[in-house]
Amino acid sequence: MRRAAACAAATLLGLGGCAADAPRSQALARAATAVPTAAPATASAIFLHPDGMGANTWTAARLASVGPDGRLAWDRLPHVAVYVGPLLDSVTASSNGGGTSHAWGVRAASDSFGRVDGQRIPRARSGATVPLMVEAKAAGKRIGIVNTASVTDAGTGVHLADVASRREHASIAAQMIAAEPDVMLGGGEQWFLPAGIAGRHGPGRRTDDRNLVEEARAKGYRIVYTAEELAQVPAGTRRLLGLFASEDTFADFEDFASADATAQPFAPGAPRYDAMVAAALRLLEDAPSGFLLVAEEEATDNLGGANHARGVIDAAVGADRAIALAAELAGRRGDVTVVVASDSDCGGLQVGGDDQGVDRPVAARDDNGAPIDGAMGPASVPFLAAPDRAGRRLPFAIHWASSGDMSGGLVARGAGPGARLLQGTIDSTDVYSALYLGLFGREPSP
């Protein structure tokens, strides 16, 4: 059995077969599954991706959550670097291009989803022919995916699938189920069911008649659909698929472009980001050969693009709760690497102090025409920060630069063995290297 597993891993990694008369292939198979002595067998990594969040968004989260004198869990991560994420054809990353760089450790193009110029990437930064998550699974580590959007969204789907276009959700879902992650939690139920088949959250949209939910059940997955059901998953569950919305677990971009800013942006029956991360860690943390978890908070990106300040800040504070969970695990164990990074700053959110008084609505726009949000949207009273050291709750407003992805102001932070690479200024591909170092005890090299 050991030899069979090693052969399968070697083939998956593009290192050759395992024929009885091929000693070199056997050696490569052993190398594919061996964990270097520099890392403990249980070495693990967590990549938290609060998408669309620049340092300015963390400022807003800090003010709202702990006040100007407080510090977030994000602030307390010991390793920090300026993050730059240019693509082959753009200085600003797309979600799928940036996700491809994270998953493969190579610079990608704007339309990449595990491919460049329509062709599958031949080699990852480590030399393997698969993304890091698949390489980790081949090495015996358990793997998990979390996304508050559809699990097929670029920030997570690209770690297990490659397609010509990020819109090929049905193909991405099929590839993700074929990869058999141990835990997969998020939205996107519609891409797991055939068209015309009613799901818990809406009808399916697949045109190939495949029912991926039933295929997953046959593979031994427990299926859950709500926050309540997720909370009841018993310890020791080996495989878990959570589908908490037809599409996203928050209101989508088009809805919020014209929605009342006082509307609730998050689906009431769906678990929030930190609850999904907590559930995933609970099922993965005891893996005897370690684990890799990739978890994306997409609400910070989509709601940022919709210039919905209250929703962005709420989601950002939730992302910080997830960081606290990961940092606690890393501190307790010592063999867990945590990396936190976004590939773009969506909406260009900026925090501005407000000296007009807490009861007066903020202006609709500032002097150069940028839209402004108060606590309940445009032309509402300002936000109030949590108390400072003197007990004062200072007012602030949110100014918006755009409705799309922006470059600059990006910061990567982390903790644990692999996070020591997060220093100075790093490229998006260095996220891969930090995770790889944390998992395998060495930096990737072809």
Image: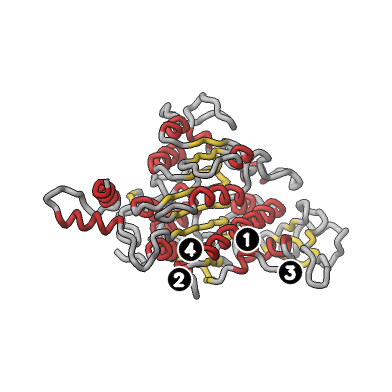
What secondary structure is marked by label 2?
helix
Q: Which comes before the other along the chain, label 4 or label 1?
A: 4
Amino acid under disc 2? Leu
Name of the residue lying farthest toward the top: 196
Quadrant location of the N terminus in the rendered image = top left
In the rendered image, which residue does mark 4 sit on?
337
- In three-dimensional space, the C-alpha distance between marks 1 and 3, rounded to whole angstroms, equals 20 Å
Q: What residue would you read off at disc 1? A: 348
Q: Nearer the viewer, residue 357 or 191?
A: 191
Task: Give the alpha-carbon distance from disc 4 to disc 3, as whole Å.
Answer: 28 Å
Residue behind mark 2: 421
Residue 68: mark: 3
Q: Amino acid at mark 4?
A: Thr
* Residue sitting at x 74%, y 58%: 372
Q: In this orientation, does residue 109 appear?
A: no
Label 4 or label 3, whichever lies nearer to me, is: 4
Q: Quadrant of the C terminus?
A: bottom left
| Residue nearer the viewer, 312 or 2 | 2
Q: Secondary structure at mark 3?
A: loop
Residue at the extreme bottom: 424
Q: CA distance from mark 4 to mark 2?
A: 11 Å
Distance Cα–Cα, label 3 vs label 2: 29 Å
Tag 4 secondary structure: strand
First along the sequence among labels 2 and 1: 1
Which of the two labelled residues, at mark 4 and mark 3, occupies the earlier sequence position? 3
| Secondary element at tag 1 | loop
Q: Position of residue 357 (x, y in %)?
A: 87, 64
Mark 3 belongs to which amino acid? Pro
Q: Does residue 175 appear left or right of residue 32 in this picture?
A: right
Instruction: Work out how far the residue at label 2 is from the one at label 1, CA to CA, in angstroms.
Output: 27 Å
Q: Amino acid at mark 1?
A: Gly
Image position of 408 (left or right of 90) = right
